[in-house]
Amino acid sequence: MTDPDDRGPEERPGRATPVRDVPPPDAPAPDVARTPRPWIERIGLAAIATVLALMFGGVAASAWVGGEPFLAVMGGIGCLMTAWVGGLTLFRG
């Protein structure tokens, strides 16, 4: 049998939960220094995005030839979005 005081404050009946120090929603976000990713990581992530974009493009092309326009459009959108994010990763870091 467990001791009732072993439970966390959320599980104890009749006890107040601790107040957390949460900034109000309208408070400005703290300034965070962003360090760019290393070049090898950028190139690797862009290469993975390229492979996935080619796969989406292949799905779009084969769906178009097969007479499935909705799937072709969705595959084309996936191809463009993946290529876009890959480019952002490579150039923006």
Image: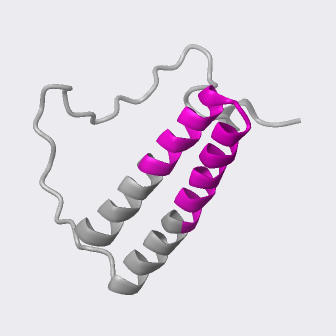
In the foreground, 78 or 44: 78
> Which quadrant of the view contains residue 46?
bottom left
In the foreground, 46 or 39: 46
The location of residue 90, given as percent across then percent down, is 33, 71
- Is 2 left or right of 23, judged from the image as shown? right
Q: Is residue 60 magenta?
A: yes
Q: Residue furthest bottom?
A: 40
Taking 49 as reference, is 44 above or below it?
Answer: below
The location of residue 66, given as percent across then percent down, is 74, 37
Q: Residue furthest right?
A: 1
> Which quadrant of the view contains residue 91?
bottom left
Q: Residue furthest top?
A: 14
In the foreground, 15 or 71: 71
Q: Name the residue at 68% across, 41% down.
A: 65
Which image quarter holds the C terminus? bottom left
Taking 47 as reference, is 87 above or below it?
Answer: above
- Is 63 left or right of 56, judged from the image as shown? right
The location of residue 88, given as percent across then percent down, is 30, 61
Which image quarter holds the N terminus? top right
Count of picture labels? 0
> Which quadrant of the view contains residue 27?
top left
Q: Main secondary structure of the magenta part?
A: helix
Taking 13 as reference, is 49 above or below it?
Answer: below
Q: Name the residue at 16% across, 65% down.
A: 33
The residue stretch that appears in magenta: 51-80
- Is 49 left or right of 5, judged from the image as shown? left
Q: Name the residue at 38% across, 76% down.
A: 42
The location of residue 14, given as percent across then percent down, is 56, 13
In the foreground, 7 or 27: 27
